[in-house]
Image (cartoon, rainbow, N blue to C red):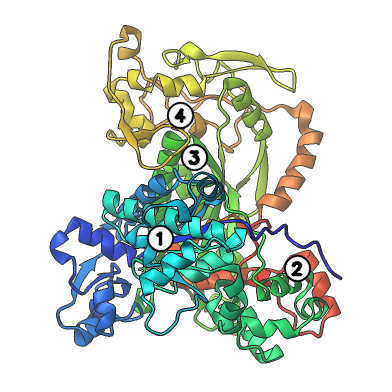
Amino acid sequence: MPVARPETSDARVIAHVDMDCFYVQVEQRKQPELRGLPTAVVQYNEWQGGGLIAVSYEARKCGVKRSMRGDEAKAACPEIQLVQVPVARGKADLNTYRSAGSEVVSILALSGKCERASIDEVYLDLTDAAESMLADAPPESLESIDEEALKSHILGMRREDGDDFKESVRDWICRKDADRRDKLLACGIIIVAALRKQVLKETEFSCSAGIAHNKMLAKLASGMNKPAQQTVVPYSAVQELLSSLPVKKMKQLGGKLGTSLQTDLGIDTVGDLLQFSETKLQEHYGINTGTWLWNIARGISGEEVQGRLLPKSHGSGKTFPGPRALKSLSNVQHWLNQLSEELSERLSSDLEQNKRIASTLTLHASAFRSRDSDSHKKFPSKSCPLRYGVTKVQEDAFNLFQAALREYMGPFGNKQETWRITGLSVSASKIVDIPSGTSSIMRYFQSQSTVPSCSADGCVQEHIVNAPSASEGCSEQRSVETQAASLEGDTGATYTLPDLDNLHKNIDLIPEKDMSCLLNETTDFQTQSGSNKGTQTKRIGRKTNNAKEKNQGMPSIVDIFKNYTATPQSKQETREDSTVSSTSKRANFSSRSSHSSEVNQEVEERRETEWSYKIGEIDQSVFDELPAEIQREFRSLLRPNKQLKAGKSKGDGSASSIAHYFPPLNR
Ligand code: TTP
């Protein structure tokens, strides 16, 4: 059964920008004496010199590969410089690399719609910029073309023997008789070359780029000529590119689906897929995957560049290979505490800097059992609504782990059998912007008014959580409540909440001693402004000119959300918040039993959507940061969606689905 074809337009200009040996470049910027030397960044792990995670192009020339350990790299290239990844909480600390990636994003985002695809990759939709250039200053009208643009690799470009490479590129870029699609790509070449030069000038990082009329082709092209080069895929070169492209080279075909295409259909290259009708591919792989395969064989991809400069989720993970596998609950708890602390720190700064809040906490682990009768059994992933505050995240992560462990070991777990944990990660997803304005914040709270929370026994528990009332929870927070607003919610109840927007505006009035509560006791922080939430940062001043505010504790945005807890609270109950000044009491939440039936229904709906693990909600950038072992586990845990299952049942039994690997972004 044919399904709707994605909207495609050949007249688009999409670029995929990928930093070259990124972590190495970040370290070389820190230590300029390493520039030009064979260099590699190694994981935090002393064993055999640590595992290499990034290798400079000079080191690659000596045969050093990412799969090597430090000792092997030294054997292959004795002069190699090994730099250890920064460490915090006993694990790799990627913050420097994340911020370096943000620097790049903030430059590229000025050129058009920009999607941060991973820690060092960006997609740009440059169609508008290219259209403007074509209209106002087409390439053939330019007096000169930048040298960087003239170094571009144009797939399928015809060149006579002896032709000068740059002259041929110039001719291609300035062709008057080219069709509009290629003319737009020619503008893209000039725009991207200028952007790459700007990135180099402002950040000292070199990058490579692919330019094509869709994301899939741009991504393929960006890796074809590295480092510091750009590659263009004219429309006429698409079939040639795909016909020789091994299936496994396509990101989504690197796993089981690619293997199945090779073994079940005898396909070696993406172009080989052209022999199969869409119906045939659907019979084998289900409707969506079949159509997707049919499309990619023709270079068709309707995937839009998302205007997203910030990650879709945050994650923190660590592996414990070989003898370092964790075997006691106290050890697991120790590491979950570390990971949760890091996650909380990032959530807090996301909230502070970007006014974004995450709502789902997911725990994932990889494990094995001592007497594994069922060696394929995966350690289940568990999710629950996310509660802000380090101790809450730690507590929930550990509860999720215990629930998952029980499921993993079985209800009547054999007492003789022991378990080992080889990887742990916690991540926060479903991140949304906090709507500005008290009224919408109120709605936000109300829409969140019933949330299941994780419990020690691993079951979902539902609690009715209401917004704090002014008289109860915020009674001692009057100093920030200057902007408090009273409003009528849908339920007819009247609540008062501090105005988050104005709290932000007034943030520089917060006394120094109370700044700490804003960022989990961190006293030095930054904020960002404008729609471009990149790295342009502004140090917040610390005025204490408001006498009233000087001596009174200020609750923070973080505290407001900490207060907004899924923990059951009986009416009128109040608690002391240990993380805020002792005078500031926590907000109260009262049960509203009159809404219980609606609430139960909502709970059921939420239970279905929230007590499950969804890889689609995990950002690729976060996914890439997770330990390879956990990434593998993630992949193997993906389940086909119902529609695909329907397709599968019609098939030959060998059916698989793309959902096993990377679900389309719109899923
Ligand atoms: P990549 O973009 O895959 O590689 P790279 O930038 O080092 O090199 P290239 O020029 O070939 O693109 O990864 C970006 C960074 O992510 C990399 O510098 C280090 C980190 N990384 C890991 O930590 N572990 C991994 O397994 C991979 C693939 C990357």
Q: Which residue is mark 4?
A: 557
Can you say which quadrant of the picture contains the N terminus? bottom right
Splitting the image into 4 quarters, where does residue 547 fall? top left
- Give whichever of discs 4 and 2 has the lower sequence position: 2
Q: Residues within 10 Å of mark 1 (few under 14, many from 20)?
A: few
How far is disc 2 from disc 3 in space, using C-alphas? 37 Å
Q: Which residue is mark 2?
A: 288
Q: Nearer the viewer, mark 3 or mark 1?
A: 3
Mark 1 beta carbon near ligand 1 (under 8 Å): no
- Give whichever of discs 1 and 4 has the lower sequence position: 1
Q: What's the amino acid at mark 2? A: Asn
Q: Residues within 10 Å of mark 4 (few under 14, many from 20)?
A: many
Can you say which quadrant of the picture contains the C terminus? bottom right
Is residue 426 placed above or below 475 in the rendered structure? below
- Give whichever of discs 2 and 3 has the lower sequence position: 2
Q: Secondary structure at mark 4?
A: helix
Q: Pinpoint residue 370: horizontal percent, then vertical percent.
A: 49, 81
How far is disc 4 from disc 3 in space, using C-alphas? 10 Å
Q: Residues within 10 Å of mark 3 (few under 14, many from 20)?
A: many
One can see residue 296 in this view: yes
Q: Which residue is mark 3?
A: 388
Q: Is residue 410 left or right of residue 352?
A: right
Q: Secondary structure at mark 3?
A: loop
Q: Residue at x 49, y 39 (%)?
A: 388
Name the residue nearer the viewer: 237 or 633.
Answer: 237
Q: Is residue 152 left or right of residue 372?
A: left
Q: Which mark is residue 330?
A: 1
How far is disc 1 from disc 2 in space, using C-alphas? 45 Å
Q: Nearer the viewer, mark 1 or mark 2?
A: 2
Q: Quadrant location of ligand 1? A: bottom left
How far is disc 1 from disc 4 in space, using C-alphas? 32 Å
- Give whichever of discs 1 and 2 has the lower sequence position: 2
